[in-house]
Image (cartoon, grey):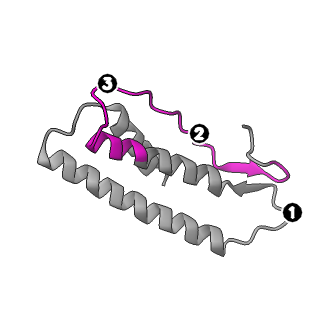
Amino acid sequence: MKRIVLFCVATLLAGTALAQSDYEREQIRLMLLQLQNIEALGKQMESNTRTLDSDRYRFDHSRFDKDLKAVRAGLEHYLTPSRAQPRDVADLNGQYQKERGTKHGND
């Protein structure tokens, strides 16, 4: 799953111009569909995962969801930018392990 997120990030960093070819636009739309599937799997995993108080580390679903939304927004912006100037890409956290008793790990 981390490879998919990294692939999406690499795509965002590849350029900020309009998607020029029909092939490129279609591939980005497919990536958006895959992100939708990943989001659904993440929500399913979150609702079906039981953590024990003795678990030291847990998957940080909220941080993962935030990063997926950032990737989605970047891809959608690439397809239909609101302005001609490039914008700063927000840094993704990439760390989804949190220690018991902390809100967001090492934030």
Q: Is residue 22 above or below residue 50?
A: above
Number of residues whose C-alpha sits closer than 10 Å to that of mark 2, classed few (under 14), some (14–19) or many (20 or more):
few
Where residue 69 sits in the image (x, y, percent)?
A: 49, 50
Which of the two discs, 3 and 2, sits closer to the camera?
3
Which of the two discs, 2 and 1, sits closer to the camera?
2
Query: What amino acid does circle 1 point to?
Result: Ser
Q: Is residue 102 above or below residue 37?
A: above
- Report the span colored magenta: 73-102
Kindly report the secondary structure that dominates the magenta region of the rendered protein.
loop
State the quadrant of the C terminus: top right
Q: Using residue 84 as the reference point, say whether residue 53 is left or right of it.
A: right
Query: What amino acid does circle 3 point to?
Result: Gln
Q: CA distance from mark 3 to mark 1?
A: 50 Å
Q: Is residue 75 magenta?
A: yes
Q: Using residue 98 as the reference point, say whether residue 24 is left or right of it.
A: left
Disc number for residue 29: none
Q: Secondary structure at mark 3?
A: loop
Q: CA distance from mark 2 to mark 1?
A: 25 Å
The residue positioned farthest toward the top in the image shown: 85
Look at 19% across and 45% down and name the residue there.
24
Upstream in sequence: badge 2 or badge 1: 1
- Which residue corresponds to mark 3? 85
Where residue 99 sits in the image (x, y, percent)?
A: 79, 49
Query: What amino acid does circle 2 point to?
Result: Asn
- Which residue corresponds to mark 1? 54
Q: CA distance from mark 3 to mark 2?
A: 25 Å
Q: Secondary structure at mark 1?
A: loop
The residue positioned farthest toward the bottom in the image shown: 48
- Which residue corresponds to mark 2? 93
Q: Is residue 20 magenta?
A: no
Q: Secondary structure at mark 2?
A: loop
Relative to the observer, which residue lies in front, 79 or 12?
79
